[in-house]
């Protein structure tokens, strides 16, 4: 059997080659085996196969990392270019007939007008943006292989997905069954994000409520309610305060787990678990109705 890189880690380049059908025989079988054993690798393969690159958030990151002061100076020079230096030159004899090549060379030596300077400024910004995005999504020579999402994409849902990927049935099976204590803990946790919900509001079939935790995401409280579905599948319902515009239910996949999320005027909501997207959507719809 071929010694596939001494059984080293599978990189994005390997996954893309696998998706493009460029791996054969033992190489393809090795990648398939690694994907089956690594939930994070399976999620990465799923994302690459669907072209789910987080470009929107990557472009948002440009707003923070772009050299705004320098770009404003370039644009100002494009709008109000300084006068060219005056040079005294001797009059050249008038040419009789010039070849076409010499005419093109003469045109290429003409000073740029204001519109050409503006085009140059935008070209500079395009090159800067392309370089920044490339550095975030493409491994440079000598860099270690990366199989996680780009830093710009690592919002609260990504953080929850990484945490949830560690959950197994044993994580929750021994949680307290005292309904009165659970209700009290729930109200205390939700008070950190300005909500007062009864135990019934966050209970929905076929989920069995197990516990509630208050987590911290970038200095903001994040409430996670953990459940078991059918007694063996961990599912979490999470809420965080948010000042972003409201939107309806959307679905995505992270860390090999399905997610349905939505946002109200004041809070962001998400439900996550290793279960079919359609079934998760039904549960999310029930919880959203109860939140209304």
Image: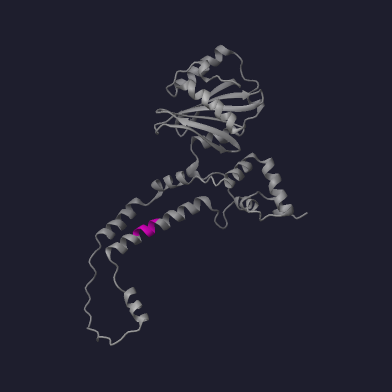
104 relative to 22 in the view: left or right: left
Location of residue 40 by image quarter: top right
Q: Is residue 99 magenta?
A: no
Residue at 45% x, 55% y: name it: 130
Q: Position of residue 124 (x, y in %)?
A: 38, 59
Count of marks placed on residues: 0
Location of residue 191 by image quarter: top left
Q: Position of residue 76 (x, y in %)?
A: 27, 56
Location of residue 56 by image quarter: top left
Q: Position of residue 289 (x, y in %)?
A: 48, 22
Q: How is the image coloured?
A: one colour
Q: Nearer the viewer, residue 268 or 63?
A: 268
Using the image, determine if residue 62 lies above or below residue 205.
below
Using the image, determine if residue 22 lies above or below residue 266.
below
Q: Nearer the viewer, residue 124 or 46?
A: 46
Q: Is residue 123 magenta?
A: yes
Using the image, determine if residue 136 lies above or below residue 82.
above
Q: Nearer the viewer, residue 125 or 119?
A: 119
Residue at 64% x, 27% y: name it: 233
Residue at 63% x, 24% y: name it: 229
Q: Position of residue 116 (x, y in %)?
A: 31, 64
Quadrant of the frame with the C terminus: top left
Q: Which residues are magenta?
A: 121-125
Quadrant of the frame with the N terminus: bottom right
- Magenta stretch prevailing secondary structure: helix
Using the image, determine if residue 42 lies above or below residue 226.
below
């Amino acid at each position: 059997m071929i010694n596939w890189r001494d059984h080293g880690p599978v990189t994005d380049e390997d996954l893309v080659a696998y998706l493009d059908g460029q791996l054969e025989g033992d190489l393809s079988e090795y990648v398939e085996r690694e994907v089956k054993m690594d939930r994070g690798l399976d999620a990465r393969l799923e994302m690459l196969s669907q072209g789910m690159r987080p470009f929107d958030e990557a472009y948002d990151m440009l707003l923070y990392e772009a050299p705004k002061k320098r770009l404003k100076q370039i644009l100002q020079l494009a709008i109000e270019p300084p006068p060219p230096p005056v040079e005294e030159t001797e009059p050249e004899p008038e040419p009789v007939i010039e070849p076409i090549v010499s005419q093109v060379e003469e045109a290429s030596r003409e000073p740029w007008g204001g519109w050409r300077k503006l085009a140059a400024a935008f070209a500079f910004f395009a090159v800067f943006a392309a370089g920044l995005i490339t550095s975030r999504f493409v491994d440079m020579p000598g860099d270690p292989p990366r199989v996680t999402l780009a830093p710009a994409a690592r919002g609260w849902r990504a953080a929850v997905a990484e945490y949830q990927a560690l959950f197994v049935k044993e994580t929750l099976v021994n949680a307290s069954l005292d309904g009165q204590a659970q209700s009290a803990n729930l109200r205390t946790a939700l008070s950190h994000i300005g909500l007062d919900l009864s135990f019934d509001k966050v209970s929905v079939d076929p989920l069995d409520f197990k516990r509630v935790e208050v987590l911290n995401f970038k200095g903001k409280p994040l409430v996670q309610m953990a459940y078991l579905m059918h007694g063996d599948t961990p599912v979490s319902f999470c809420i965080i305060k948010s000042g972003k515009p409201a939107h309806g239910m959307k679905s995505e996949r992270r860390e090999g787990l399905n997610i349905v999320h939505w946002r109200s005027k004041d809070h962001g909501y998400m439900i996550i678990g290793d279960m079919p997207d359609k079934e998760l959507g039904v549960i999310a719809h029930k919880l959203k109705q109860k939140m209304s």
